[in-house]
Amino acid sequence: MAQIREMFDQIHKRYDLLNHLMSAGRDIAWRKTCCKKLPQKENAVVLDLCGGTGDFSLAYKKIGGEPKLSIAGDFAGKMLGVAAQKDANLKLVQMDAIKIPLASNSVDIVLNGFGMRNIPYLDLAFNEIFRVLKPGGYFATLDFFKPEKTIPKLFYHKIAPLAIPFVGMIFSKRNAYRYLVLSILNFLTAKEYATKAKKAGFTLRCINALDFGLAHIVLLEKK
């Protein structure tokens, strides 16, 4: 975990650009689509877990309005520093997803964009997210899951690895980009992810493939 934290701290200034490159510029639209699927809750407490540079929190505000409290939680402090520059109203908390420093039944919505595949103990993270959510709360995951269909398989197995030298020249962090590509190929499929979440107590609301399956939304509810 320490190595992963250090990697994200090293690329914090260019992380947004990295997301745009890996999603072919579609990550902004995907966040908006995900937020539109969430119920609008008045006076909501929203946790952007693995919130990084705060883009998911900002997308939610644009779609759902200003929450009562918007928390960006991430284990990489320098990433949160970028989030602070984007939105002074964000409450920034450096945290580990497997030990969230929030009270049980205290959060209405948990967002997670491109972060769950970086957590080595996924079961523990699901348990923690379930714990902090209020009954009736929602957990929305937007991520690059292990590809199942032809187009995303081609992209992640062939195109992305070939792009490593080019992106490495931009970021001067070739190993970081290599890790992010491999983390997708070694992750769960969206269906496998949803099955694991249901074992933690969640009810699956929907799985939506985005742009032929390059990314997926998995929407879960705590009954």
Image (cartoon, rainbow, N blue to C red):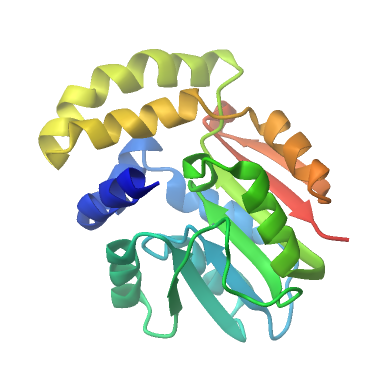
Q: Is residue 94 visible?
A: yes
* 138 sits left or right of 211 in the view: right
Q: Is residue 35 left or right of residue 179?
A: right
- Label total for image: 0
Q: Is residue 91 above or below residue 216?
A: below
Q: Position of residue 5 (x, y in %)?
A: 34, 51
Query: Where in the figure is residue 220, as x and y percent of width and height?
Result: 76, 52
Q: Where does the image place residue 33, in percent across and percent down from the top left? A: 60, 52
Q: Residue at image x 74%, y 59%?
A: 130
Toward the viewer: 105 or 204? 105
The answer to whether 79 appears left or right of 197 in the picture is: left
Q: Quadrant of the C terminus?
A: bottom right
Look at the picture and state if 145 lies above or below 171. Answer: above
Quarter of the image for residue 175 reads top left
Percent from the top left, x then y, of residue 158?
A: 37, 13
**Front residue of 121 and 198:** 121
Q: Along the horizontal axis of the image, is 14 left or right of 30? A: left
Image: 159 above or below 34? above
Identified at 72% across, 50% down, the residue is 219
Q: Is residue 58 visible?
A: no
Residue appearing at x 46%, y 61% in the figure: 51
Q: Residue furthest right?
A: 223
Q: Does 19 sit above or below residue 12?
A: above
